[in-house]
Amino acid sequence: MIRACVIAFATSTLLACDNTHPRQGAGADANAAPAIELDTPDRALRSYWAVMDWGRAQPIADEEVQREARRVELFNRTVIQDLAREASPRSIYEETFDRDILEVKQETPSRAVITVVVRNTTPIPVGAHATEAELRRRERGDRYRYVMEMVGKEWRVAEIWEVDYGGGWRRKTSRGPKKPDVPILTFFGV
């Protein structure tokens, strides 16, 4: 018990001395949009990540939760127990990530490439059994490249690339006018 109190005191003291990370004050709104800084490529990328994380953390409307619970209940009535699902709306949006910038390379005054490693830090659910390969991948993370472009006087994410299975780079985002996807996946119809 005493040890727990000492650890709690030491942690709170260290956090009180840490001025490198902005913290929410007592009156701050936890749902407030993050501040966006677009003056450098790395700050713009960190702002992009902050917006993505903020969007995942937003609460879900009660009606949406109830609708998903009802959908899963009805689905489970149509399948055997081995195929049954749990009602967990937006579970993929509740995942957490650790991101490390490995390199920022400014190629021109208006273009930079940032290489990063992203690790999924979401706690492994109770009952899930991770394989050695899955644990290694969680530890190692995945590499991505963000192409940043200057728009006016602000840096923006223009392209996202990921490492493909052969070790080369494959573009995750596309440019140009958005056009509707041709529905070809059949998995959700099975």
Image (cartoon, grey):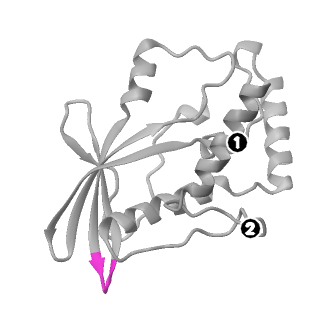
Position of residue 71 relative to residue 110, above or below, is above
Return the residue found at the far left. Answer: 108
Please state which amino acid type lies under the numbered disc 2: Asp
For disc 1, the marked residue is 9
Residue nearest the observer in this picture, 78 or 124:
124
Secondary element type, mark 2: loop
Q: Which mark is residue 71?
A: none
Few, some or many residues within 10 Å of mark 1 (<14, 14–19, 20+): few
Please state the horizontal and vertical placement of residue 71, each as a whole percent of the image. 80, 39
Q: Which residues are magenta?
A: 150-154
For disc 2, the marked residue is 29
Residues under labels 1 and 2: Cα distance?
A: 26 Å
- Magenta stretch, main secondary structure class: strand
Please state the horizontal and vertical placement of residue 65, each as a whole percent of the image. 81, 47
As for residue 41 lying within the magenta part, the answer is no
**Residue name at image x 70 percent, y 34 percent:** 6
**Residue name at image x 60 percent, y 25 percent:** 124
The residue mark sitting in front, 1 or 2, is: 1
**Residue name at image x 37 percent, y 46 percent:** 100
Please state which amino acid type lies under the numbered disc 1: Phe
Position of residue 121 relative to residue 136, above or below, is below
